Amino acid sequence: MTRDRTLVLFINLGHLLDHLVMLVFPTVVLALGREWGRPYSELLPLSLGGFIAVGAFAIPAGWLGDHWSRYKMMAVFFFGIGASLFMTGLARSSWQIAAGLTLTGMFAAIYHPVGIAMLVASPKNLGRALGWNGLWGNLGLAAAAIVSGALMDLFGWRAAFFVPGLAAIAAGAAFLARVPDPGAVQKTSRTLGLHIDGRTMARIFAILVVATACGGIIFNSATIAMPKVFDERLRELTQTNFGIGALVALVYGIAAFAQVAMGTLIDRFELRRLMIGIALVQVPLLLVAASVEGWPMLAAALAMMLAVFGQIPINDAIVGRYCADEYRSRVYAVRYVITFCVAAVAVPLISVLHGTAGGFRNVFLVLAALATAIFAASLFFPTRRALGRQAVPA
């Protein structure tokens, strides 16, 4: 295996672990609530610090990646999430769990601004590279549900933190052993954008901010809530932690391939059309998910997550295509600060709305409204012709 392929393998593995570790607790909370005799709406907010940290620490992580070393930051990522997960598994009280999850979020913040910047530095097919990377990340979402559910049923909730923690540490050791340090990022440009005028660049990133903010809340809300949604609405299908985790994993595992498909489309079609299309599809699917249960809920969840996952590589492609390499870690950092900090709204949003008469119906209605905002913003994205006069064709 060549150096580049080995590097991409570890970058993709890092994406899997990054999403896995951030979604262990939404499955663990089901067992923890029964063991401690406390309600879901009271325990879920323990994860809020982690979701805030994964956004807030993205900017310093991106700055260190550009100015110090992306390679070394990736090593810190692997060992950091492993150690913090292990500490969370040793927790004896609510505040210790909250502290462990916050620390996990701090190290998980490294991945997106650093790992994605390394990935898009020189791929021949940007969309394909992002699509496959997205697949690995979403397989991490699926693994979080099924692995956590199985480990809880077999060994208790603490094992759901210990096993992924040890896996992350092992991945870090293998990364250092198999991937040589490529050195510092080479500076090749004095401009943030690649020959695009300031007004057009501001317009692109304003649209990106809207898509990132609204998409982050939709993504986080859907993925955090899914185990509990299935616990409530699919009771005739399964009543075990493993069964719930398996159904969530099935949905995420199939939906993950939407990013591979979208990656292929990114290399063939203009970003504006793809943004409009995927946002337009999300709205009715979220509305359907608000009202159904049983087998229809399972089908609606699959279709909904295909659309939600499909949007992610589009946002990353905008940065990868229009931002100079030496700035990418910082620009990705800003994007993911918005994504994860705004997405932290998902935890209180779910907790508050789940306690109302409508329950998860109200959650999905709010997410449909946010998808409508993404659709409206995407209508203003520059066309291929307009961008073609200034930059690389989109």
Image (cartoon, rainbow, N blue to C red):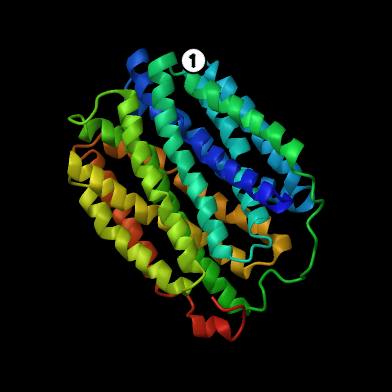
> Would you name the residue on which mark 1 appears?
93
Whole-percent x and y of residue 368? 29, 55
Q: Residue at x 27, y 30 (%)?
A: 231
Secondary element type, mark 1: loop
Residue 372 shown left or right of residue 140 in the figure: left
Does 167 sit above or below residue 378? above
Circle 1: residue type: Ser
Q: Quadrant of residue 346?
A: top left
Whole-percent x and y of residue 187? 80, 64
Q: Quadrant of residue 192?
A: bottom right
Q: Residue at x 73, y 50 (%)?
A: 3
Q: Residue at x 21, y 31 (%)?
A: 237
Location of the C terminus (image quadrant): bottom right
Does 175 sit above or below residue 391? above
163 or 347, which lies in front?
A: 163
Residue 291 shown left or right of residue 64 in the figure: left
Whole-percent x and y of residue 175? 70, 38
- Mark 1 Cα shell of 10 Å, populated few (<14), some (14-19), many (≥20): few
Does any portion of residue 359 appear in the rendered image? yes
Residue 206 shown left or right of residue 117 in the figure: left
Residue 229 shown left or right of residue 79 in the figure: left
